[in-house]
Each structure stands twice: as C-alpha cells, then as structure tokens.
Image (cartoon, rainbow, N blue to C red):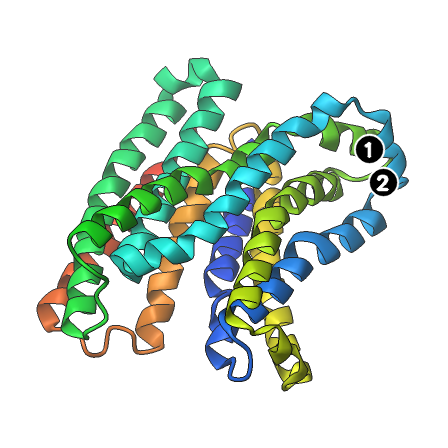
Amino acid sequence: MAGNFWLGLAILVGSGMLNASFPLPMKYSRAWKWENTWFLFTTLALFVIPLILAALAVPDLMGVYTALPARAFLPGIIFGFLWGTAQVTFGIAIAGVGMAMAFAIVVGMSGLFGSLITMGVLHPSDLSGPRGIALIVSGAILVIGLVIYGRAGRDRERETGAAGPSGANFRKGLIVCLYTGLMGGMINLGFAFSGTISDAAVRSGAGGQSATLAVWLVVLAAGYIPNLAYTVYLMWRNGTASRFGAATLREGLLALAVAALWLGGTMGYGSGATAMGAYGTSIGYAIYVTILLLWSTTLGVLTGEWKQASPATVRRMKAGVGVILVSVLVLSSTGFF
C-alpha cells in the first residue's frame, strides 16, 4: 500500500506539472485567434488522441463498450459534459474577476469538491478516519492559502493594470467562477465512478493502467461537446474560421503541443490515481490539483508575470504558496496510514 502510494504520488506530481504547463504554447500563437487554437486543441486532446490511444491499448475496445449496459456510461457522460461546460465558462470567469482569482477559486473548488465527494461516495466511513480528517484539514489549510494567493494575484493585476472589472460585472464574474470551480471537479467524478468500464477493459486483456484509457475516452468525448459548440460559435460570430489557412503548420504544431501537455497531465493523473490505490481519486486528486496550482504559479514567476508586482505583493504570493505547500504535506502524510 505505502509503495503504491508513493509511486502514485510521484506520478501525480509530474502530471500536475504537465497540466499546469499546457497553456504555455498558446502564448506563441500569432496567426490564429483563441477559438482556432482551442478548437484544434480540444479536438485532438478530448477526442482524436484518446480514441487512438484507447483503440491501441484496449483489446476489442468496441466489443468492450457494446457488451456494457447503457447505465455504465452515464457517470462518464454526465460528469464529463458538466466538466466540459466548465472549460467554456473558465474564460468568462477570467474576464470577470481576473486570471489570478479565477485560477485560485477554480482550482481550489475543483480539488476540494472533486476529492471530498469521491471519498464520501466510495469510502464514506473513512471521512471520520485518519485519511478523511487529513483531507478535511488539508482542505481548510488550502482555502487559507488560496485566499492569500488570490489577494496577491488581485493586487498584482491592479498594480500592472490588468485587473478585471468591478461592481456588477465583478459579481457576475464571481458567480460564473464559482460555477466553474464546482463543475471543474466533475472530471474526477466521471473517472472515479466509471469503474465498470475499466473493469470490463481489464477483462478484455488490458492492463490496469491501460484500462483507464477506455474510461477517459468516454469522459473526455462528453466534455468535447460543449467545447466544440462554443468554439464553432465564436468562429462564426468573429469570422475567424478563415484563419485556419494562415501559418497552418506552425499554429497546428502549437495546438498539438498544448494537447500533448494537457492530455499527458490528465491521463497521468489517471495512472497516478490507479497506482495510489483506493484513495487515488480522493486524496490523489486533491494533491494533483494543488500541484497544478503551485507549478502554474512557478511558471508565472519564471515567465515574468510577477516582475512588475510590488515587493509586498510578491511576499503575499509567497506566503500563499507556502500555506498551499503545507496542505500538500498534510495530504501526503496519508501515505503513512
């Protein structure tokens, strides 16, 4: 158990870092608008690549699916679709409250709800045991860290002139942000509650790690639907579909890099959670999203996003990161139980 926990933890740390890095290639996009890159990225990451990987890794994938009752797919489809709506509303949340606050709220809520609900459903008796207490305590510490971090991010955006709107628009943005944070954790529920699919894939001859690909295909394909609808709508409204003819190879490779980083992090989470064992989708998910937040902050520092912030704001950011690190250490201590 302990060996699997620490192996899973190592995979989750690497996966969180990969996922936090996925927006970086988009910074170098010049000829395409956001909706062009996002369309190709989500088409590759949420449908094409998962389909290829699952078909290669799971023997008789279509036979596995057709042998299952329709209800086996419902958790993956429902929770995957809800998570897909959060992908769409995240951009709206950023416009309303600013990048730093949106990211802090969304990542924090996704981690807390995605992990607590999973443990409450799959292991309800453990909520009052050492692991459940560690998860709750860690969650409380994480909230404190996120409040400090979000304040630092808000100050940085004000100091650099990048702060979002205030007043009614800010309140609307905050509501959208809360919705996005709640729905963002649905991807974990879709994965955690689709054990029937992965079990069927194992029976067909797939290994434990490979079997998760059969689950991810269902969850991600469902999440692709709202992303496809939104990007097609934006291209129609903004008249940007024609931009696909400009610098196609360069921009396409950037979108492929975005897809590879995001998908590597997401599917890596599935492998890490599986290696961690019974608590991979609860404690493991909380660790994963917290590492994602920490590494995204590190990348922001390395790329100069905090360069123009005041020393007091930078100190506040570091304090928030320090508190968040404590929450990770509390979660990691569950490996000794």
Residue 245 vs residue 147: left or right?
right
Question: Label for residue 65?
Answer: 1
Q: How many labels does the image show?
A: 2
In depth, the one of 275 and 149 nearer the eye is 149
In depth, the one of 303 and 126 nearer the eye is 303
Mark 2 neighbour density, 10 Å: few (under 14) some (14–19) many (20 or more):
some
Kindly check if marks 2 and 1 are in contact, taking CB atoms under 8 A apart as contact: yes
* Alpha-carbon span between mark 2 and mark 1: 6 Å
From the top left corner, tell me how far across and down residue 176 is, in percent: 34, 45
Residue that label 2 marks: 61
Q: Residue at x 45, y 43 (%)?
A: 184
Callout 2 amino acid: Leu
Residue 73 versus residue 207 in the image, above or below: above
Q: Which residue is drawn at 62% across and 37% down?
A: 274
The extreme left residue here reads: 312
Q: In which quarter of the image is the N terminus?
A: top right
From the top left corner, tell me how far across and down residue 186 is, in percent: 50, 37
SS assignment at label 1: helix
From the top left corner, tell me how far across and down residue 179 is, in percent: 37, 40
Residue 194 versus residue 62 in the image, above or below: above
Q: Residue at x 41, y 58 (%)?
A: 91
Residue 51 vs residue 128: left or right?
right
In depth, the one of 223 and 50 nearer the eye is 223
From the top left corner, tell me how far across and down residue 335 is, in percent: 45, 34
Callout 1 amino acid: Tyr
Residue 276 versus residue 130 in the image, above or below: below
